[in-house]
């Protein structure tokens, strides 16, 4: 009987999927089919879909992808295999695709007690633009969160601010909404998990222009959401936090939908990220690294400690 490979720490169990279906897990959704904290026994991701799922390929001049079955998502439709498995890691591989001619190797690894790491290696085999044009690349990777108590994600958009300053909550009105709704978190105190949502529901989003000259405007903060991405967190079960950290911020961008996996019986948001390169060269391996932490929320100071430890490990390598 077929099963998905399993990775486990003392705090959670993760099952890694290629593009094949299994049970209620649908064909074409790869990455983390299930991420189950042992404290709750509940999957963080929508079980028919996945988390850290390779969705799209975009390159300068690349025509739209059109699968015979109607799908617009090339990585979902092309062959993918589980290349290597052991107790600590699972490797997925997608050979050169038929349309964009991109190959990928995706490694999932766990670290005690609560870390799931993903390394993405991509090679470009063909250009679709003129030699003098920049071969820009972008690729959406989606995580479909199962009915969280709070749809917002939280991050620090002002990197110059002190640890408790510059934090915001981000959401949208609906999947088709173009503009983000951004609300600040207080800088004068720590927050419990439930207080985040209470604050978001009790105050209007930031206006395009600030009420005072020393305050960043909504327009400026929205622009920063399109800048390099360092980290964000959200609440998946009560006070359980999912923190995503990105090792090469200049190669990541933020993406989000409040109901990417539907609205019934409750909204299932997509907490996503985009891989980005300004000018991808052919036959060169490009790498993206990220880390998912699933743990009890202990305040923004603890979030920053996790982020610093993750980036300090990069320096030590």
Image (cartoon, rainbow, N blue to C red):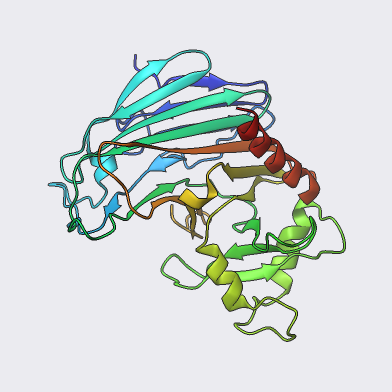
Instruction: Give residue 116's position: percent from left, percent from top.
Output: 57, 31
Residue 121: quarter of image = top left
69 sits to left or right of 3: left
- Give the number of callouts: 0
Q: Is residue 215 above or below residue 176?
A: below
Res 272 visible: no
Residue at horizontal 50 percent and vertical 52 percent from the top: 250
Q: Nearer the viewer, residue 79 or 198?
A: 79
Specify the quadrant of the image occupied by residue 47: top left
Q: Residue at x 63, y 43 (%)?
A: 242
Visible residue check, residue 38: yes
Please provide percent x and percent y for residue 128.
17, 53
Q: Position of residue 56 (x, y in %)?
A: 32, 49
Compared to residue 138, the image places residue 105 above or below, namely: above
Q: Is residue 101 left or right of residue 204?
A: left
Residue at image location 54% in from the left, 49% down from the top: 249
**Which residue sits furthest left?**
68
Whether residue 224 sits left or right of residue 215 in the image: it is: left
Q: Residue at x 77, y 50 (%)?
A: 300
- Residue 282 location (% of width, % of height): 25, 41
Against 210, residue 82 (above or below) is above
Q: Residue furthest right?
A: 188
Q: Nearer the viewer, residue 110 or 160?
A: 160
Quadrant of the drawing holding the C terminus: top right
Quadrant of the image containing the N terminus: top left
Closer to the camera in the image, 64 or 42: 64
């Amino acid at each position: 009987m077929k099963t998905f490979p399993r990775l486990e720490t003392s705090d959670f169990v993760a099952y890694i999927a290629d593009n094949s279906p299994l049970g209620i897990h649908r064909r074409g959704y790869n990455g983390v089919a299930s991420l189950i904290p042992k404290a709750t026994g509940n999957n963080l991701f929508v079980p028919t879909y996945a988390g850290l799922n390779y969705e799209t390929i975009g390159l300068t001049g690349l025509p739209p992808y059109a699968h015979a079955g109607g799908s617009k998502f090339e990585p979902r439709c092309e062959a993918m295999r589980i290349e290597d498995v052991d107790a600590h890691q699972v490797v997925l591989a997608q050979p050169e695709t038929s349309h964009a001619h991109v190959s990928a190797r995706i490694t999932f690894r766990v670290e005690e007690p609560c870390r799931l790491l993903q390394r993405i290696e991509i090679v470009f085999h063909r250009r679709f633009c003129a030699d003098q044009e920049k071969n820009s690349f972008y690729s959406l990777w989606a995580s479909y969160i199962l009915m969280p108590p709070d749809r917002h994600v939280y991050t620090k958009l002002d990197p110059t601010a002190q640890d408790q300053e510059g934090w915001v909550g981000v959401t949208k009105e609906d999947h088709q909404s173009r503009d983000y709704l951004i609300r600040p978190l207080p800088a004068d105190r720590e927050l419990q998990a439930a207080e985040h949502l209470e604050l978001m529901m009790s105050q209007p989003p930031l206006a395009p222009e600030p009420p005072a000259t020393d305050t960043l405007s909504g327009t400026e903060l929205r622009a920063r959401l399109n800048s390099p991405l360092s980290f964000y967190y959200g609440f998946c079960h009560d006070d359980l936090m999912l923190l995503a950290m990105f090792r090469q911020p200049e190669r990541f961008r933020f993406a989000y939908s409040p109901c990417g996996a539907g609205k019934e019986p409750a909204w299932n948001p997509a907490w996503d990220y985009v891989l980005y390169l300004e000018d991808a060269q052919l036959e060169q391996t490009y790498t993206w690294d990220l880390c998912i932490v699933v743990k009890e929320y202990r305040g923004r100071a603890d979030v920053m400690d996790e982020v610093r430890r993750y980036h300090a490990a990069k320096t030590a390598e």
